[in-house]
Image (tube, rainbow, N blue to C red):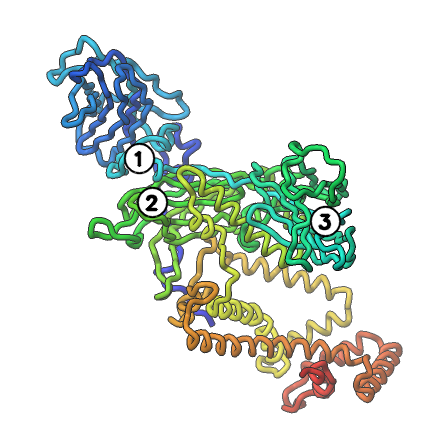
Amino acid sequence: MQRPPSEEFSLKETSPKIAGSGNYSVGDKLTCTYDLVEQMQYLYVRVVKAKELPHKDVTGSCDPYVEVKLGNYKGITRHFEKKSNPEWDHVFAFSQDRIQSSFVEIIVKDKDVVLDDFIGRILFELHDVPRRVPPDSPLAPQWYKLEDKRGEKLKHGEIMLAVWKGTQADECFPEAWHSDAATVGREGISKIRGKVYLSPKLWYVRVNVIECQDLVPSDRNKPLEACVKVALGGQSTRTRISLVKTANPTWNEDIVFVAAEPFEEGLMLTVEDRGNKDEVLGKCLLPLHSVNRRWDNKTVQSRWHNLEKHPMYDGEKKEVKFASRIHLRVCLDGGYHVLDESTNYSSDLRPTAKQIWKSSIGVLELGIISAKGLSPMKTREGRATTDAFCVAKYGNKWVRTRTIIDNFSPNWNEQYTWEVYDPCTVITIGAFDNGHLHGSNKDLRIGKVRIRLSTLETERVYTHSYPLIALHPSGVKKMGEVQLAVRFSCTSYINMLHKYSQPILPKMHYVHPLSMSQTDTLRHNATQIVSTRLARAEPPLKKEVVEYMLDVGQHIWSVRRSKANFFRIVNVASNLVGLVKWFDSICHWKNPLTTLLIHVLFVMLILSPELILPTFFLYLFVLGIWRYRWKPRHPPHMDIRLSHADAVTYDELDEEFDTFPTGKGSDVVRMRYDRLRSIGGRIQTVAGDLATQGERFHSLLSWRDPRASALFVTFCLMAAIVLYVTPFQVVALLGVFYVLRHPRFRTKLPSMPANFFRRLPSGADRML
């Protein structure tokens, strides 16, 4: 029996100060649209532009920039060379929790080689700064006369500013310079900003290679062993060698690739002669934007294409009098959902083609509030630190919070929304350490959380602190906790319930299914395309982040996962075993009163067989109502015991984190191979036993054992005669009374039917 998880790795319910929970209220309109996170107060300073700035250099020019000071915090705009009327349009956000001054100072300076010259300044008392509450319009900037250090107005020089108090709901917040990141230079600001990303639109490209005509090999005396190599970007495969060994080979073979819009690569087809050192007989390059698109199983018209030694796009081809040709049927299959996630954790199941999308059934809202107790992820200036940010992925929308610099308990308080098309989907939230601020090239993973929407009650706000659990070569470790608020709102309860009667995947997956090996290969290609495209954004969503969120590498062999899956099977089977043990205790009169009640129940059902099914369903109804009291109150989370992460050995972890192919020595590989053979032996024994039982059922009437089949056929004849002349109720009563007979009428020897069944032959006799 599994032990309960330790408190350290358990889920904790929290009570954040958010309006959506119903336990906290605030007095402004912000709560209407931003109610799943705590409000964070900021002082905003928007520096728009300046005009008629006086010249300070001896050259008579001005290289102006603006410095915004609030206590110990200082933000700086970029400078312009030789420009008296600069335009910055830069926003600064100062957290009010750290304000140590009663006024904010905006200073205009002239960039110089040695010492920057003071041009002028503006002071604002904080108690005079107005408050802006969305959805009010943004505060209009105004022109202000610059003052000197004594507070006197300058004859020349004005600056356009807007200063106000607000929260993180302000539309200026994502692009603003934050005092929380005061140690980051202006060039590093873009690497810590929060962003919303969209996965590229993925298509399956189906290429049906039919035939070729008039191929011209260099050696015409040899039979032609022609095949077609089809490539799309980094994906490539070959058809089989044609059975027709002439200049007009045929294949009629389907090949499927993954492509992303906008299409950047063309489809390259190369006809090769494998019997003559892969001699190239011709090439054809097809642009994907000219390929037909379909969202059903209708036949796409095939086309002939010329083969050339150095192909160009169709639009650039010149007319030729004679050329080898290839017959193709190419289409973009939009009726499929292109799998880029693990099927167990899919967040989107819609087909590619928008024409066949169904309407949404609800809205998912996520508030990423804070984290606490994060583990140190790197060392900077001799001390441990963490620069944490979160990434959430649902459907084709990825969101990234801003990075909180040098903080083990960061507060993000950012809220995001997604449309929901299927309740049986999963949202994934991952926490990472930003490794791009100080020369590192990788974002380090801290941990992640998965939440299945179907486990959430509609319209309820779930506020919990989720443990961030990571598996390291040294063992399982809690990396901290992340506090989230989640709400799943349903727009149409009927449509949501109707989804439970629909296939999980789009229709094309069942009408024209892809093979298991095809699905695995295409998913790998899809994840590579998504990670490459998102890594080109600014700030980039790096490959290691995308692969961690998409569970890349989960299919690789692991002793730990194999054990975990084995115990999952044992846990599922334990319910059936428990039922068998309960019935065995009834049969052996362990509790005479219960056994007598079962006798009465069976007599009633036998005398009134029409009550059997109603009684069965009534029992299930009562059982379901009874168990309602113990229904889960919290969404599921990572379980180290279910994952078998708390009982894994060092060598098993070392094997799980080994590279593929392995980088270990021959002795270690030999030991692990022997262990794998041992585990595989157990698996094949269990599988063989299951196969043996099934084959024994088949052998009842196969006459492989003629005496056993004769006995079984004779028994069937006698049973048929008895059942014809004897009422069914009598037979059923006798059978139930025999099964529930008192222990004094029992023997420890196996029953006659069991002995007969175990003597039947199986395919094991013919195994080598």
In the displayed structure, does residue 491 sit left or right of residue 46? right
- Nearer the viewer's eye, disc 1 or disc 3? 3
Q: Position of residue 671 (x, y in %)?
A: 45, 77
Q: Mark 3 — residue?
A: 209
Mark 2 and mark 1 in contact (Cβ < 8 Å)?
no
Q: Residue drawn at (67%, 35%), measured in percent from left and top?
A: 314
Residue kind at label 2, given as amino acid type: His
Callout 2 secondary element: loop
Q: Position of residue 74 (x, y in %)?
A: 21, 31
Q: In this orientation, does residue 438 appear?
A: yes
| Farthest-out residue, left | 150
Q: Mark 1 — residue?
A: 187
N-terminal of the pair, mark 1 or mark 3, is 1
**Mark identifier at residue 94:** none
Residue kind at label 3, given as amino acid type: Val
Q: In this orientation, does residue 593 appear?
A: no
In the displayed structure, does residue 516 sit left or right of residue 38? right
Q: Residue drawn at (29%, 49%), measured in percent from left and top?
A: 386
| Farthest-out residue, top | 155
Q: Report the Cα–Cα distance between label 1 and label 2.
A: 12 Å
Depicted 52 relative to depicted 534: above or below: above
Q: Position of residue 598 (x, y in %)?
A: 66, 74
Q: Mark 2 — residue?
A: 436
Residue kind at label 1, given as amino acid type: Glu
Depicted 161 relative to depicted 753: above or below: above
Callout 3 secondary element: strand
Q: Report the Cα–Cα distance between label 1 and label 3.
A: 51 Å
10 Å crowding of disc 1: few (<14), some (14-19), many (20+): few
Q: Position of residue 364 (x, y in %)?
A: 50, 41
